[in-house]
Image: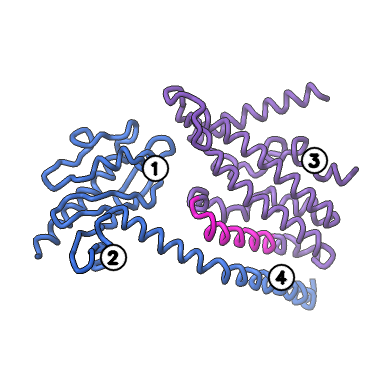
């Protein structure tokens, strides 16, 4: 293949790339606002589910969101990522100013379908509500673990316990 | 008549998954629930029809030596478009399908149809071929998903079909995919032997 031919083929390929990039840029401009809007509102909704009493949330430290209603501090939401069975579980835990858990929301997980995935169920997550530092928060003690998913259940429990500990440290500072 | 054949070829006789046995990777991975299977089929179908159409349209100006890279550019463009659209308007589905949406780029059904069919046929034939193959993929994926979800989770699209106690979790885990696809292939082969 002579040099001219290589250049010709290269130019044709480049032309196709330019057309493709143009088409993608067009679609990107149209979809990007929607994608960003969704990412923002879905995270805000999750914060609200973890700490329902608050109206506004502010990230005060890394992975810690302070929730307040008007001027009054209601509690904190902690972003935790305990090690599950299939990878890290991304979860939000809300704790009020008395050190009581207000809600748990799982954001991302890679647990086993049919088994570990059941940590998403409301019947499992609602067990953590109103727990404090005085509770053991451990599967087989005060938490009913999901059948066949002890590791996933324990991971969520660890995340909740860690959040209560962090909350109590914040409470002490006042 | 031949146009009809272009369309119907992919449905059963040359069903990409159950007869040609290509595109098995996404088939095994996302056929655990019916909704995932339908979402994946829609995305793959969109890319397949569009890429067949465009490849047939440009086949006269594409030099033979660089046709494969050009096919890949065309395919990945449509995959990225469907990825953006899904992310913007079908977030839950996008979340469930995860990495398998970008992986449509390397789905052999799409490159296979571009190379084996669209590069040599008219725009109309190629589009019909794309639609037929997409429907064949949807039928196979949907069929596998219906079997797996009903036996594994006891419910399809949230409607209970089996008592929870009878549901066998293995069916929505990877082994269930292999078992189901094996039985379906065997059944289709048996059926063909009888008809012919």
Q: Disc 2 or 1, which lies upstream in sequence?
A: 2
CA separation in Å, label 4 and label 2: 48 Å
Task: Indicate the position of residue B4 as horizontal and vertical percent values.
Answer: 85, 43
The residue singled out by tag 1 in the image is A111
Q: Which mark is residue A56?
A: 2
Q: Residue at x 78, y 23 (%)?
A: B193
The answer to whether residue B53 is left or right of residue A165 is right
Task: Please identify, in this view, whether the residue under mark 2 or under mark 1 is nearer the observer.
Answer: 2
Q: What element carries label 2?
A: strand
Q: Residue at x 63, y 49 (%)?
A: B42
Q: Quadrant of the C terminus of chain B?
A: top right
Q: Are marks 4 and 2 on the same chain?
A: yes
CA separation in Å, label 3 and label 4: 32 Å
CA separation in Å, label 3 and label 1: 40 Å
Residue stretch in magenta = B72-92
Q: Chain A is drawn in which colour?
A: blue
Task: Please identify, in this view, whether the residue under mark 2 or under mark 3 is nearer the observer.
Answer: 2
Q: Disc 4 or 2, which lies upstream in sequence?
A: 4
Name the image quarter holding residue B119. Answer: bottom right
The residue singled out by tag 4 in the image is A16
């Amino acid at each position: 293949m002579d040099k001219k031919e290589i250049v010709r083929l290269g130019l044709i390929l480049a032309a196709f790339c330019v057309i493709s990039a143009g088409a993608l840029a067009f679609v990107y401009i149209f979809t990007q606002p929607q994608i960003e809007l969704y990412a923002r509102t879905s995270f805000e909704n999750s914060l609200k589910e973890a700490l329902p009493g608050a109206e506004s949330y502010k990230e005060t430290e890394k992975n810690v969101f302070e929730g307040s209603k008007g001027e009054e501090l209601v509690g904190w939401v902690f972003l935790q990522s305990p090690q599950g069975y299939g990878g890290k579980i991304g979860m939000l835990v809300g704790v009020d100013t008395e050190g009581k858990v207000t809600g748990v929301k799982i954001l991302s997980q890679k647990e086993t379908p049919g088994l570990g995935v059941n940590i998403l169920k409301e019947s499992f997550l609602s067990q953590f509500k109103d727990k404090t530092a005085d509770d053991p928060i451990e599967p087989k003690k005060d938490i009913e673990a999901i059948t066949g998913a002890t590791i996933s259940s324990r991971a969520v429990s660890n995340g909740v316990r860690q959040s209560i500990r962090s909350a109590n440290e914040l409470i002490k500072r006042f | 008549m031949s146009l009809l054949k272009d369309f119907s070829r992919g449905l059963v006789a040359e069903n990409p998954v159950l007869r040609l046995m290509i595109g098995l990777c996404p088939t095994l991975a996302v056929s655990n629930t019916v909704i995932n299977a339908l979402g994946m089929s829609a995305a793959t179908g969109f890319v397949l029809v569009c890429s067949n159409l465009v490849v047939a349209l440009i086949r006269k100006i594409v030099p033979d030596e660089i046709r494969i890279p050009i096919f890949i550019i065309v395919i990945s463009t449509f995959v990225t478009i469907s990825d953006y659209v899904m992310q913007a308007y079908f977030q839950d589905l996008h979340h469930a399908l995860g990495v398998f949406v970008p992986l449509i780029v390397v789905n052999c059904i799409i490159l296979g149809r571009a190379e084996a069919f669209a590069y040599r046929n008219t725009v109309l034939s190629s589009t019909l071929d794309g639609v037929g193959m997409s429907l064949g993929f949807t039928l196979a994926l949907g069929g596998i998903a219906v079997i797996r979800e009903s036996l594994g989770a006891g419910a399809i699209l949230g409607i209970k079909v089996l008592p929870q106690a009878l549901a066998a979790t293995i069916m929505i885990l990877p082994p269930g995919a292999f078992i189901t696809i094996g039985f379906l292939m065997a059944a289709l082969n048996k059926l063909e032997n009888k008809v012919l």
